[in-house]
Amino acid sequence: MKAIIALLLLVTLPVAASAQPRSQVVFAFLGLTSSDDSISASQLRVLENRLTTSLVQIAEQERFSIVVPRNRERVLEELSHYRNADPDAHNRAPLREVVSAHGLVTGEVHQLNGSVYLDVQLVQTETGATLFAYSGEFEDYEHALRASPASIYALFELDPPDEVLAALERAETEIEGRPTGSALLQPQQYTAEPELRALTGTWKGDEGLGEVTIRSDGSGTAELHSGDYMKLRVSVDDELIIIRQDEPNSPKMYLHAFPYSIAVQVVERARPMRWRFRLSEDGRSLIGSKDTTSLQIRQGRVESADNTYSRAAVWTRVK
């Protein structure tokens, strides 16, 4: 946590110095969003309140400030331009001018095949880049609610208190070969030994991707938010579906999360992307994980890259 605060202070202190004490770091909580009709507004608010409680506790422990901006919708709109690599994003007001905070805490929740997916991110207002992220998959909404405080502690790289750990242990079941924190899905929910032809068609990709096309020869392409495309290679090993990046790293692959000046650095440090999926029984979802890279960024420089990082991922069939 101290490393996170130091990073944000180093990057944003000159902007914020006139408005607050030099030692004070401010995080703005943007709440949770969901495009899933199966998650009701009341469920979203209860889950959001649980996260707020944890954030306040962490803020007291670590001596930073947590605020809820009045212009939340405006901040979310501006953040979307950075994430979607809007070509005019560089002409827009920096996030730090839209919200008086060093970092943003935001998240999304959705449900698929009965399981609830919770994703939270810590975003730097200086660049709009995602500094840290946590993804969890839970058996149902109640399990996600009980485990949600641990997601905030994980986001800030802190050890949860004993009562939070106890709730997490009750809420999560680890599956061999999947990221820790994934909830148990019954084997009959997946297609046994899927064939490549069952995967051909168009899919809606996960974060950073638009539509993904898989062809019968195992080749594929993924639409990037920059408007460009990334080549993919698809293979099947028993029940496991492996989808790999099939071209060298290039900045276009990271512009959904970083400005170009950082994306060119990520190219040199990040491993090629790989998804490990299983096909849902109805053939409409690819469910599993993405092998990617967790980055530490300071003052516009990539200082370290963790190429052992994986997160939950879901693709849904379009046609």
Image (cartoon, rainbow, N blue to C red):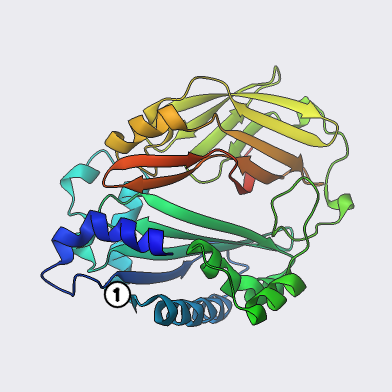
What residue is drawn where x is 52% and y is 40%?
293
Q: Between residues 278 and 150, which one lies in front from this camera angle? A: 150
Taking 198 as reference, is 294 left or right?
left
> In the image, is residue 133 above or below residue 217?
below
What residue is drawn where x is 78% and y is 63%?
173
Q: Between residues 76 and 27, which one lies in front from this camera angle? A: 27
> In the image, is residue 6 above or below residue 287?
below
Provide residue 276's location: percent of width, then percent of height.
69, 38
- Which amino acid, mark 1? Pro
Provide residue 49's location: percent of width, then percent of height.
50, 81
Q: Between residues 193 and 134, which one lies in front from this camera angle? A: 134
Provide residue 210's location: percent of width, then percent of height.
49, 39
Provide residue 302's location: percent of width, then percent of height.
36, 40
Q: Secondary structure at mark 1?
A: loop
Q: Is residue 317 visible?
A: no
For the C terminus, the image quarter is: top right
Q: Between residues 315 and 299, which one lies in front from this camera angle? A: 299
